[in-house]
Image (cartoon, rainbow, N blue to C red):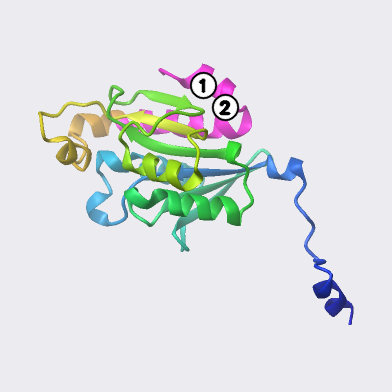
Amino acid sequence: MQNLFKKWFGFSDKPKLTEEDKMKKFLIVGLGNIGEKYANTRHNIGFKILDYLAESNDILFETVKLGDVATLKIKGRTLILLKPSTFMNLSGKSIKYWLEKEKIPLENLLVVTDDLNLPFGSLRLKMKGSDGGHNGLKDTQDKLQTVKYNRFRFGISDEFSTGRQVDYVLGEWTDEENTQLKERLKISADLVKSFALAGVNTTMNQYNGK
């Protein structure tokens, strides 16, 4: 009878999340394309950074609705790492679903992506901006109906000839780039953790252009 009463009046045994609890939860999204053939491509740097975060903290991804998800807990913060399984052009669908499912405020979203307009390995954290021609960001903007969300852009440079942009972004890293990536991935992981622990402004000041 007690359970029926709770059901009628919308009561729940689960405690409601306070505003303070919500501020301790973050959605970190790495953009990329699923499948082995894309694993080491420039366009998949978002996946690669999240994989590094997971591996260096001994956590595993689980395949769930609209993506692969892992949970990283650091100093009282919970970071939900998401690699969308919707392919790059529909990334926003997965992001919107997980934001709503986990009741994470928009200011606690960080989207990690590649950027042709930055030199290789450059890091740039911003709180808003256009999609810059990036299809993953374009769909995210469309699904969230705003350009005001945090994005961490990793430079992949624009060393390609006219008409070869698609081949370049979907191409694999060179041997030299792979060597440099080891250090860049660690710094990128530190940036993500700083975002959750120190906040976006402090993190921008410390890491942008690093």
Q: Nearer the viewer, residue 89 or 83?
A: 89
- Secondary structure at badge 1 equals helix
Relative placement, left or right, of 79 versus 137 is: right
Q: Position of residue 98 (x, y in %)?
A: 54, 54
Q: Nearer the viewer, residue 146 or 83?
A: 146
Residue bearing the label numbered 2: 200
Residue bearing the label numbered 1: 204
Q: Looking at the figure, which quarter contains the N terminus?
A: bottom right
Residue shown at 80% from the left, 58% from the top: 15
Residue type pointed to by label 2? Val
Residue shown at 46% from the left, 26% from the top: 125
- The main secondary structure of the magenta stretch is helix
Q: Position of residue 70 (x, y in %)?
A: 51, 53
Q: Is residue 76 magenta?
A: no
- The answer to which image quadrant residue 12 occupies is bottom right
Which disc is residue 61 wearing? none
Magenta highlight range: 181-210
Q: Residues within 10 Å of mark 2 (few under 14, many from 20)?
A: many
Above-or-below relation of 104 to 60 = above
Disc 2 to disc 1: CB gap under 8 Å = yes
Q: Is residue 207 magenta?
A: yes
Q: Is residue 21 visible?
A: yes
Residue type pointed to by label 1? Met
Relative placement, left or right, of 51 versus 11 is: left
Above-or-below relation of 174 to 210 = below
Relative placement, left or right, of 108 versus 110 is: right
- Secondary structure at badge 2 equals helix
Q: Is residue 60 visible?
A: no
What residue occupies the far left of the structure in this picture? 162
